[in-house]
Amino acid sequence: MTGAEFYDTSLQLLYAPLVVPVLFGLYRLTTRATAERARFPEAIPFVSLYCTLFLLQTLCDLLARGPGVAALGGAGSVADQMVGLIMVLLGDWRVLWLVFALSLPTHAAVRAVVFSLLGAFAVPLLAGIAFRLSGTDEARVLYLVHELLFTGLALALATWWVPTRVPAGPLRGFLRGACGYVAAYYALWATADVIILLGSDLGFWLRVIPNQLYYSCWVPFVWFTAFRLRA
């Protein structure tokens, strides 16, 4: 089986990415977010709510891309493209909302939502403009531009925004780590797409890794870097 063939299987698209979120969901049902376990207690309510919301979003994303799209016309259909666009926007927004909500003052919650929405829409918009100007009709080039732009944004947040907005301490380390995690999976996606564009099937095998980081591990990563296993 080639990497391209494996990449389109239900195992890679649905079943493998479901394992960690389901296990984490079971863990959350039996675990409370307490001040004794929190690395930065002031953010307990937000992080707890955030992890619950985006665990549900991850499960909906996977199910929508699998059985949902199949029921509405299959891969390549209008439904597939719309679901893909919505989930990309949500996937980028969840990162930006986390960073802005915890780096801005608590009274600036609306501003955090606005900033994160602007960033989530700006990256695909800029990627689309660059793709049009490139003169190619190869869709993977569009993916690559988006991946490179968001890698740059995540690194800018980690090296400039967070250090200038959050005092040194556990919260700053948490936010910089989250941005670094996102930059890592976007950089892996970009590397994989360069390899695919160069004509190698190995890129599809490599793409499986950032898929797992994005779908399976993001919410558990946020939780376990915000809370200790034991008090």
Image (cartoon, helix red, strand yellow):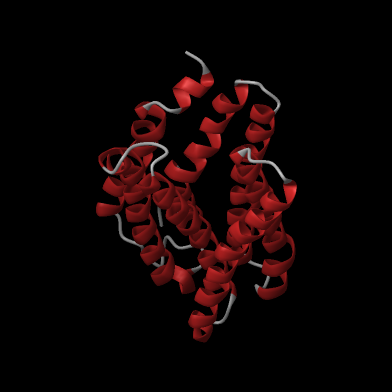
**Residue 62: x and y, percent?**
36, 43
**Residue 112: x and y, percent?**
54, 76
**Residue 125: x and y, percent?**
61, 61
At x 44%, y 44%, the residue is: 215
User: 215 or 169, which lies in front?
Assistant: 215
With respect to residue 99, does 144 lie above or below? above
Q: How many numbered marks appear?
A: 0
Residue 24 seen in the figure: no
At x 38%, y 42%, the residue is: 77
Question: Left or right of 156: which side holds 27?
Answer: left
With respect to residue 119, does 137 lie above or below? above
At x 32%, y 54%, the residue is: 56
User: 137 or 145, which lies in front?
Assistant: 137
Residue 176, quarter of the rendered image: bottom right
Location of the C terminus (image quadrant): bottom left
Residue 108 seen in the figure: yes
**Residue 6: x and y, percent?**
45, 22
User: 151 or 45, which lies in front?
Assistant: 151
Residue 199, quarter of the rendered image: top right
Question: Left or right of 6: which side holds 138?
Answer: right
At x 55%, y 38%, the residue is: 210
